[in-house]
Amino acid sequence: MTETTTVRLVKRPSGMVTPDCFAIAPEPVRAPGDGEITVKVAFVSLDPAMRGWMVDRKSYIPPIGIGEIMRAGIVGQVTASNAPQFAVGDTVTGWGGVAQHFTGPAMLFTKVDPDVAPLERLIGGLGMPGMTAYFGLLEVGAMQPGETVVVSGASGAVGAVVGQIARIRGGTVIGIAGGAEKCRYCVDELGFDACIDYKTENVDQRLGELIPQGLDVYFDNVGGEILEAALNHLKMKARVVICGAISIYNSTDVPPGPRNYLNLLVQSARMEGFVVTTYAHRAGEAVAEMAGWMHDGKLHFREDVQVGIERFPEVFNMLFTGKNFGKLVLKVN
Amino acid sequence: MTETTTVRLVKRPSGMVTPDCFAIAPEPVRAPGDGEITVKVAFVSLDPAMRGWMVDRKSYIPPIGIGEIMRAGIVGQVTASNAPQFAVGDTVTGWGGVAQHFTGPAMLFTKVDPDVAPLERLIGGLGMPGMTAYFGLLEVGAMQPGETVVVSGASGAVGAVVGQIARIRGGTVIGIAGGAEKCRYCVDELGFDACIDYKTENVDQRLGELIPQGLDVYFDNVGGEILEAALNHLKMKARVVICGAISIYNSTDVPPGPRNYLNLLVQSARMEGFVVTTYAHRAGEAVAEMAGWMHDGKLHFREDVQVGIERFPEVFNMLFTGKNFGKLVLKVN
């Protein structure tokens, strides 16, 4: 194998990504330089945060440069190693790119056990999105047993795990998701106490009916009007965890912030953002506990596997139209 | 004395308060009921938060009812007591109302030493506004020595104390105030490192010039565009203390929230509100430390004393037009 298909960012998107933002073409596989490895990619993780990396602005990681391979979480097998910690044949996850083969610094990868779970789950519920849910709820949100937790994007890669962990930890959980099928999944399969369908229900009103006592933790994946609705239902000392804002990532103008942010004052509440990489040094602890819950049948995952690297732009947009159902991954080989 | 002038709320304001929102008239002094005291009011504290109490909505304390005396912090002398903990002649501060004599529950009052400071200061820098600054900066903001603190409303009752405490605790302090004279006061008399005049300077740009490294704590008294500007200069793990939003209290529509609140995510920062009454049980600790700093010449206060209870509506509006300079109090006897 000397050629591999890669997805390179060639134009910064405005609004939803369009196929012309990317060059998708075969190119030679680059041999690993000093301290690098080459990974044959099994699955690419598709996450809302990737939309932010396409924008040329200062953020928690540098933007993707024009002409660079589109950055993404990947899982696959090492096919060439120029780094002592990895051998050919190792299964690894890490910061790679949308490519059939990816060559990059070994320090961005972690060796994983391919028998723990299906490979795609190692970049999903047991990977970055799972860690995001775990540390966001328990550390940033400081959720305590018996508390009331509301989570948006409830059937998504992060939200589904947030809600299940909150249940495992003895909380009452209300999900917010788009569509009857996703809501049914949250309640019937994941064990949420209730789920609000934002496409057909008034979220603010339904929260008032379901949890008249208010919420202790709101885990926000969506921003916009749903964030505002949740801010109307804060208990004293409530914590709002800002994980993402999928509703505004494709906005071409900057939408208004939450008009009712002063509810934070009235309720002595806080709103806090985080980036999961802050907790990278504690990933082992989270994976061990979550894998345990999975094997005990308490934690369920659902992956939405799409096939074909050339479909990247179309499949990526499913995140924003709500067409995916479960953790979205792209099978590229 | 059987008659006293009181200010009663008779109409809820829309926008700035107008004289017809209040009935200002003499009425008989009410004798204290069981557990009540009557206070001859020396000074009434005028605070931005009072505007919020005039609105009929759920908040951290109930709204003032139509026909009720306008709630306010007061300082004065007990003239009649039906409560064992107070004697006639005691000097007290507490939750009273805009009145020459106020009769109310003894539990809303605290006995104070009139020799510690001028009486008006006991409802200012050494009263609620001082406590708000102290606990807001040190507890909610968790300010640490050497950190960079930005405070809006910098020459006001709360802001001036926030900035000085931050300096005393070894921080770098940038104020934001309206007008050259207030800025000069913050720098030359209070020892701030710098002060931005939001009336003539671009706050966002000036923050970038003055503190290119960013801020650790932003103490917000004003909301609106200045809050947005500050959110553009967060360091990692910065804390935004939401104390008030004087810029929007008189808005007749709900202004947009901070459009850039996702900077909290990017910087793993938090935005937290509070109400000073949460810390009422620790007031003694704060007053003792602040009085010590005052006597050591490290903490300076400035009161803006206006005279005449009948001027209440006009004087209250000075808070929102920026015409007051220092802690605004009304002398009513």
Image: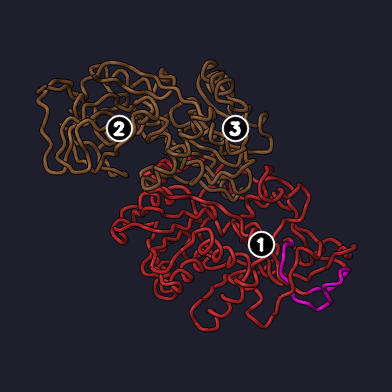
Chain colours: A brown, B red
Whole-angstrom CA distance, mark 3 to mark 1, is: 52 Å
Say which element carries label 1: helix
Q: Position of residue A78 (x, y in %)?
A: 21, 31
Q: Mark 2 lies on which chain?
A: A
Within-10-Å neighbours for mark 2: few <14, some 14–19, many 20+: many
Q: Residue B153: say if magenta.
A: no
On the image, numbered disc 1 is attached to which residue? B311
Q: Residue B286 carries which label?
A: none
State which quadrant residue A17 falls in.
top left
Amino acid type for the residue under numbered disc 3: Val
The answer as to whether the residues below labels 2 and 1 share one chain is: no
Q: Mark 3 lies on which chain?
A: A
Amino acid type for the residue under numbered disc 1: Arg
Q: Which of marks 2 and 1 is in front?
A: 2
Say which element carries label 2: strand
Amino acid type for the residue under numbered disc 2: Gly
Ranked by sequence position, the earlier of labels 3 and 2 is 2
Q: Residue B84: say if magenta.
A: yes
The answer as to whether the residues below labels 3 and 2 share one chain is: yes
Q: Mark 1 lies on which chain?
A: B
Tell me: B267 left or right of B288.
Answer: left
Magenta residues (range): B78-96
Whole-angstrom CA distance, mark 3 to mark 2, is: 29 Å
On the image, numbered disc 2 is attached to which residue? A73
Q: Residue at x 80, y 73 (%)?
A: B78
Q: Which of B155 and B62 is in front in this view?
A: B62
Q: Could you tell me which quadrant the N terminus of chain B lies in?
A: bottom right
On the image, numbered disc 3 is attached to which residue? A173
Q: Residue at x 86, y 72 (%)?
A: B84
Q: Is residue A225 visible in the rendered structure shown here? A: no
Height in image: A274 above or below B313? above
Within-10-Å neighbours for mark 1: few <14, some 14–19, many 20+: some
